Image (tube, rainbow, N blue to C red):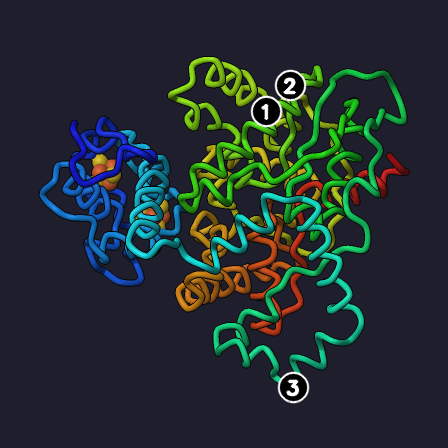
Amino acid sequence: MSTPNFSPYVPIPDGAFLRQCIHCGLCLSTCPTYALTAREISSPRGRIRMMKNVAEGTMPLTETFMHEMFFCLDCRACETACPAGVQYGALVEAARAQVEHARALQTGESSQLKKFILRQIFTKPARLRFLARLLRFYQWSGLEKLALWLRLPRIFGKKMMALAPMAPRIEAKFTFARLPEKISPRQGKVRHRVALLVGCVQDVAFASVNEDTAAVLAANGCEVIVPRHQACCGSLHGHTGDAEDAKMLARKIIELFEAVEVDAIIVNAAGCGSFMKAYHHLFADDPALHRRAENFAAKVKDLSEYLVEIGFKQPPQTLSDCATYHDACHLVHGQKVARQPREVVRAVAGANYVELNEASWCCGSAGIYNLTHFETSMQLLERKMKNIVATGAKMVVTGNPGCAIQLQHGCRQFGVSIEVVHPATLLRRAYERMGGI
Ligand code: SF4
Ligand code: SF4
């Protein structure tokens, strides 16, 4: 398929995937933006039709097209539902790269806020950690309370006032201050050797989850390598159409992890894992790097996926209250990992596990969607919170930092006391009750 209205200088939605769509509509009922709007153009089928029209030159790259590619959550629920195997995630991410390219040509700039956050902060780990420390000081010194009480974020607009309370709580110590470069099992011999991705948001806001992940792996006979100098894996950039920075960051991660001999690369953040498992698609035009990226991607495992694969040590069933599980989109739809995290939660919760209605429906976090599409994100969060509250659970388990931040905000908004926990933390607590790990 020639692609008249797409630029050849950035990724192009794959013609073979576009032709695969048979317009059956089976994906429509799974699409959160279609459910909200009931408009065909806000559905997967409608968006694919638009991409095809632009590729064939029968439609220019309009404002409507640009809006729809980013109104989409990239949750990939449509991909799970599609009987024809359309790789919707790859399509929309290429379409977003086209939109960003077109916007830059039209105005000289892509979205300012996005550019600042992704390019100036998330490509530079030292800068991210410095800003995180400032944010922690603001949060713990009382300045945040005062600023919110005085409604100061309003100076930057109504949206900032709504977003301010959503800022993730920054931890006192980041991952490298908590974990040595190598962690060995306390008991028994080494049965597996793995490397751990520390992430970017995960590193500053959920460093304790990284610590729990390493502890749980070590308790299961793994020697855990934590390579230093890790930057962002590029998923935030790739998912939002910044193909160049995504490639640059992916290349750095590949080089860093190639230097260690391991059986698996463990990721405890769904969005990162999903992106890293597809690194090779970024380097389709570079055969040598494509092969290296394929080898790398084959080793990437979500934590729960790996624990089940190696037959994790069964903990005592210790939860006295009900617990439920929320599927992160990029784990259930992006990586097709749904059974394994439930096995982990059930191992601890036993009969107190309760399945969540619409567990795989997006919570509205979706990368930086809650920053760029705040109102829609909050509508989705409300739907999710109603389902969570209906379970009667006192704990909701989820394997993605973005979902955790969103659900914690939802709990505050709904005034409910429900703890949001990562599977690693749940399992570590249970192991500790067994008498230490
Ligand atoms: S990725 Fe999600 S929001 Fe986007 S079209 Fe598919 S189901 Fe709808
Ligand atoms: S389910 Fe698949 S083939 Fe059917 S309309 Fe949706 S994307 Fe196209």
Residue 30, can we see it? no
Q: Residue at x 65, y 56 (%)?
A: 420
Count neighbours of disc 2 (C-alpha within 10 A) and say few if under 14, some if 14 to 19, many if 20 or more. Answer: some
Name the side, left or right, on which 192 lies relative to 395.
right
- Residue in the image at 67% along x and 67% along y: 417
**Which numbered dot is residue 258?**
2
State which quarter of the image contains the N terminus.
Answer: top left
- Measure the alpha-carbon separation of dots 2 and 3: 50 Å
- Kind of residue sitting beneath label 3: Leu
Q: Secondary structure at mark 2?
A: helix
Q: Identify the amino acid type marked 1.
A: Ile
Q: Nearer the viewer, residue 406 or 238?
A: 238
Q: Residue at x 74, y 19 (%)?
A: 193
Find out whether the residues at labels 1 and 3 contact each other: C-beta distance under 8 Å.
Answer: no
Q: Nearer the viewer, residue 174 or 414?
A: 174
Q: Callout 3: few (<14), some (14-19), or many (20+) C-alpha neighbours within 10 Å?
A: few
Which of the 4 quarters of the picture holds residue 80?
A: top left
Pointers 1 and 2 in contact (CB under 8 A)?
yes
Using the image, determine if residue 423 lies above or below residue 248: below
- In the picture, the disc for residue 254 is 1
Which is nearer the eye, 253 or 39? Answer: 253
Q: Quadrant of the C terminus?
A: top right
Q: Quadrant of residue 221?
A: top right
Q: Is residue 403 above or below residue 80?
A: below
Q: Is residue 116 visible?
A: yes
On the image, the x and y values in percent for residue 93 come to 37, 40
Q: Earlier in the sequence, mark 2 or mark 3?
A: 3
